[in-house]
């Protein structure tokens, strides 16, 4: 299965269904199931920001207990659109959780499936492959 590594907390936000669009500087023609890998890095600076704080309190997530270096979910890339096409159609929360600057792409994610974390997995840039059992 194709896998994409996301820095935390964005991997968890996708896995919980709170973030439905993954913004990237690059597009993909791939449509179908992918796995979400929570990278080793945690961006702690967002934990106190609006929308993030609300979601983290709802799920009792802190920088100390967030899962890293693990495959945590699968989902489907249903479509990819330029951020300029999405910006007027998304919620304030979705906007806060992504980078909607011009000339970027929004991968529309659906059909989320949380899985038991596959721990100790090292990620990499771009798509990579891993045998993920459902």
Image (cartoon, rainbow, N blue to C red):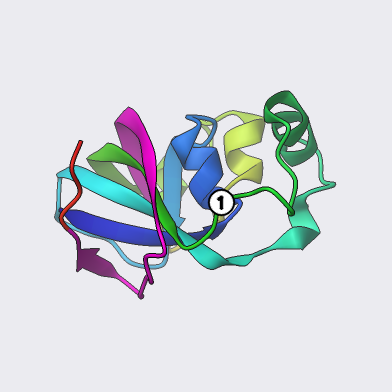
User: In this view of the protein, which residue sits in the foreground, 116 or 86?
Assistant: 116
Image position of 76 with respect to 39: above or below: above
In the image, residue 128 lies in the stretch drawn in magenta? yes
In the image, residue 8 lies in the stretch drawn in magenta? no
| Furthest residue in direction right, as rendered | 48
In the image, taking residue 44 as reference, residue 4 lies left or right, namely left
Image position of 70 with respect to 73: above or below: below
**Which portion, as a residue range, is magenta?**
106-130
| Residue at figure coordinates x 82%, y 45% from the top left | 49
Q: Quadrant of residue 51?
A: top right
User: In this view of the protein, which residue sits in the foreground, 73 or 120?
Assistant: 120
| Residue at figure coordinates x 68%, y 48% from the top left | 65
**Residue 2 picture location, percent across and down:** 19, 57
**Residue 5 picture location, percent across and down:** 39, 62
**Residue 13 picture location, percent across and down:** 55, 40
Question: Would you say residue 87 is visible in this rendering?
Answer: no
| Residue at figure coordinates x 38%, y 38% from the top left | 116
User: Is the C terminus in the top left, top right, bottom left or bottom right quadrant?
Assistant: top left
| Residue at figure coordinates x 45%, y 54% from the top left | 23
In the image, taking residue 31 as reference, residue 47 lies left or right, namely right
**Residue 46 picture location, percent across and down:** 76, 53
In the image, taking residue 68 as reference, residue 108 lies left or right, namely left
Residue at numbered disc 1: 67
Q: Identify the secondary structure beneath mark 1.
A: loop
């Amino acid at each position: 299965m194709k896998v994409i590594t996301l820095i935390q907390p964005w991997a968890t936000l996708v896995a919980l269904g709170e973030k439905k669009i993954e913004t990237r500087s690059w597009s993909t023609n791939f449509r179908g199931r992918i796995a979400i890998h929570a990278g080793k890095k945690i961006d702690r600076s967002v934990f106190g920001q609006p929308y993030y704080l609300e979601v983290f309190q709802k799920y009792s997530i802190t920088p100390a207990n967030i899962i890293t270096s693990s495959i945590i979910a699968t989902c489907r890339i249903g479509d990819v659109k330029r951020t300029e096409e999405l910006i007027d159609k998304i919620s304030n929360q979705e906007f806060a959780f992504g980078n909607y600057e011009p000339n970027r792409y929004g991968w529309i994610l659906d059909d989320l499936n949380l899985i038991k974390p596959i721990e100790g997995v090292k990620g990499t840039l771009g798509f990579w492959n891993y045998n993920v059992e459902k």
